[in-house]
Image (spheres, rainbow, N blue to C red):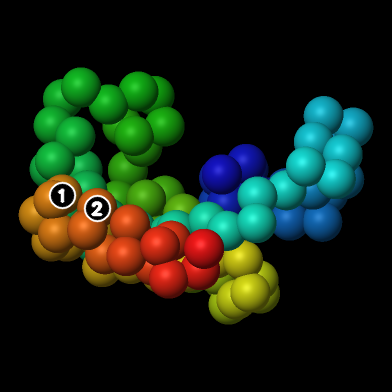
Amino acid sequence: SSLAYQGVARGLGVERVFQLNLPAIGDRLPDRTFLLEIDPDESARRVGGNGDRIEREDEQFRRQVADAYRLLAATFPQRIEAVDGSRPPADIAKEIFGRVRESL
């Protein structure tokens, strides 16, 4: 998430943030990440007033973050898989569990 939030949306650069994270993560990158794609406005509605400082950012920032996640998914397609996050949580979970089960 730091690559999307700080690297792209805050304009620090993906490579720079990645290099800053390397000492902490080393070679421990996830094998697979599921990106729940949902309209940023819908996401804000779901969170309601309970969001943290980042979730309370304006619409433009939320859209930049969403675009950043899509860019990362396109950059690392072997590791990041998009899932339609606008559906009910049970449907999303079923799809993700199915994808994981297929790869075992």
In screen coordinates, is 97 left or right of 29? left
Q: Is residue 56 above or below residue 17?
A: above
Q: Are marks 1 and 2 in contact (CB under 8 Å)?
A: yes
Tell me the mark number nearer the camera, choosing from 1 and 2.
Answer: 2
Measuring from the top left, give residue 40's x and y in whole percent.
Answer: 27, 55
Q: Is residue 99 above or below residue 7?
A: below
Residue kind at label 2, given as amino acid type: Ala
Measure the alpha-carbon separation of dots 1 and 2. Answer: 6 Å
Residue 93 - label: 2
In screen coordinates, is 22 left or right of 61? right
Judging by the rendered image, the residue that carries numbered circle 1 is 89
Q: Residues within 10 Å of mark 1 (few under 14, many from 20)?
A: few
Residue at figure coordinates x 82%, y 56% from the top left: 15
Residue kind at label 1, given as amino acid type: Pro
Residue at figure coordinates x 19%, y 34% from the top left: 47
Q: Residues within 10 Å of mark 2 (few under 14, many from 20)?
A: some
| Circle count | 2
Residue 60 - label: none
Q: Residue furthest front?
A: 104
In screen coordinates, is 91 left or right of 39? left
Is residue 68 visible in the rendered image? The answer is no
Q: Which one is nearer the viewer's eye here, 41 or 27?
A: 27
